[in-house]
Amino acid sequence: MSSKAKRFWTPGPVIVGAGPSGLAAAACLKERGVPSLIIEKESCLASLWKLKIYDHLQLHLPKQFCQLPYVPFPREYPAYPSGQQFITYMEAYANHFEIEPLLGQEVQWAKYDAAMGHWRVKTHEYEFMCRWLIVATGENEVPVLPKIPGISEFRGRLLHTSTYKNGVEFRASKVLVVGCGNSGMEISFDLCKNGAQVSLVVRDKVHILPKKILGRSSFAISVWLLKWFPVDVVDRFLLFCSRLVLGDTKQIGIQRPKMGPLQWKNSVGKTPVLDDGAFAKIKSGEIKEASLFNQKNNNNPQDSYPKNWKGKNGVYSVGFARQGLLGISMDAHKVADDIASQWNSETRHLWLDS
Ligand SMILES: Cc1cc2nc3c(=O)[nH]c(=O)nc-3n(C[C@H](O)[C@H](O)[C@H](O)COP(=O)(O)OP(=O)(O)OC[C@H]3O[C@@H](n4cnc5c(N)ncnc54)[C@H](O)[C@@H]3O)c2cc1C
Ligand SMILES: NC(=O)C1=CN([C@@H]2O[C@H](COP(=O)(O)OP(=O)(O)OC[C@H]3O[C@@H](n4cnc5c(N)ncnc54)[C@H](OP(=O)(O)O)[C@@H]3O)[C@@H](O)[C@H]2O)C=CC1
Ligand SMILES: O=C(O)C(=O)Cc1c[nH]c2ccccc12
């Protein structure tokens, strides 16, 4: 049986993914008069936030660092909006810019046709042809489930953090949480508060910073200090404050990388854990530490920040700089500026004059 996908030429860029990155890119383009088409594999926009986060999630950076271009969060939102509030904001954002992603279409492949000078973007039903392609599929798309020998004989529940909702079903159960990133730490804390007996596997060095220092967001303080001081000085300040607030993490077996937390984030891409209470539970022994490993996971290297957003032949990416929503907004502006200048000089008249 020959299945011919319906073909469409899209005048502006095709954007793959309707998360914050895709929405931000579409909005920035629209502001510059460039139409775009978002293709999303799930049946909704902001799918990570609607389908894959736990009930009690709050943004871990203050809201001014998490808003998308042009539209601030509502004034009545708290300093750290909840996941649900962020979803409501993104829905309103899409409505405001009249962004209507094509839903339920997974991009299977995208190829550059050098002879024709355009991209071919294929979903199971359609093939889109476009001059520009923006990849906004997210850094957190593929769940990592380590291969654990003998796991098939495990009779308990096995789940990835992206399907964890709350600790109700784990009350009084023994739970092993593998991985000490923000997900592992926050979910350990949530489990602990729900009466589970939690152990946490920390296999390598990790930077844990207090979410707040003297009631102020440590991230906001860092951004402010970076206006005057180089990153290594700010890192030393953060480590000094962390020691005052949390104590020496090495005392309980959690070692810090040699490089400071912001430099570590910028060069290796690992987000420091912003602690909001879990660390105290580890210290008190309520969350136990399982053995310390030192085997490295495969990294997901990206072209290094800040040159991450532009590839060859009109392909772009938004949301791969490991810089969170703030980085997404910066990427979206850069991509849209670049495309808009080409659109205005070479493409616009073809559509408006015909
Ligand atoms: C639990 C969690 C909390 C976070 N909290 C914060 C925070 O407080 N502050 C902060 O700055 N950052 C935070 N981040 C980091 C980052 O800001 C978010 O991950 C953000 O959602 C990234 O946006 P994105 O659009 O790049 O990716 P995503 O939100 O993952 O969106 C990508 C979209 O692309 C779609 N897609 C993927 N592949 C295809 C395909 N082949 N075809 C079609 N569609 C496809 C997906 O379905 C998805 O809808 C958090 C991340 C996580 C996981
Ligand atoms: N409230 C919020 O705003 C939240 C934000 N987030 C964000 O979501 C993103 C994803 O975070 P997260 O889900 O924590 O993922 P991360 O990749 O940040 O962390 C995963 C952790 O698991 C460890 N790990 C991986 N495989 C193994 C293994 N086989 N054995 C032992 N340890 C292992 C990694 O160790 P190693 O470093 O050695 O590879 C790493 O410490 C981040 O940007 C984070 O900041 C997440 C949760 C809440
Ligand atoms: O939440 C995330 O994953 C982020 O990437 C946000 C973020 C960007 N830069 C940081 C530095 C320290 C802690 C969080 C972040």
Image (cartoon, rainbow, N blue to C red):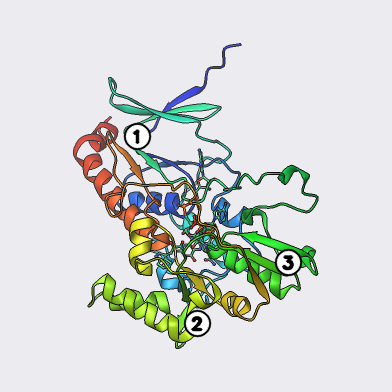
Q: Residue at x 61, y 11 (%)?
A: 1
Find disc 1 in the rendering and name its residue. 11
Give percent across and percent down for residue 316.
Answer: 33, 42
Labels 2 and 3 touching (C-beta < 8 A): no
Q: Which mark is residue 246?
A: 2
Residues 100 and 170: in front is: 170
Residue reaching furthest to the top: 1
Residue at left offset 72%, top offset 44% = 150
Q: Amino acid at mark 1?
A: Pro
Gap between marks 3 and 1, in whole Å? 48 Å
The nearer-to-camera label among 2 and 1 is 2
Cβ–Cβ under 8 Å for marks 2 and 1: no
Give the answer, above or below, for where 224 lies relative to 26. below
Residue to which mark 3 is pinned: 167
Q: Quadrant of residue 244?
A: bottom left
Q: The disc labelled 3 sits on which kind of residue? A: Gly
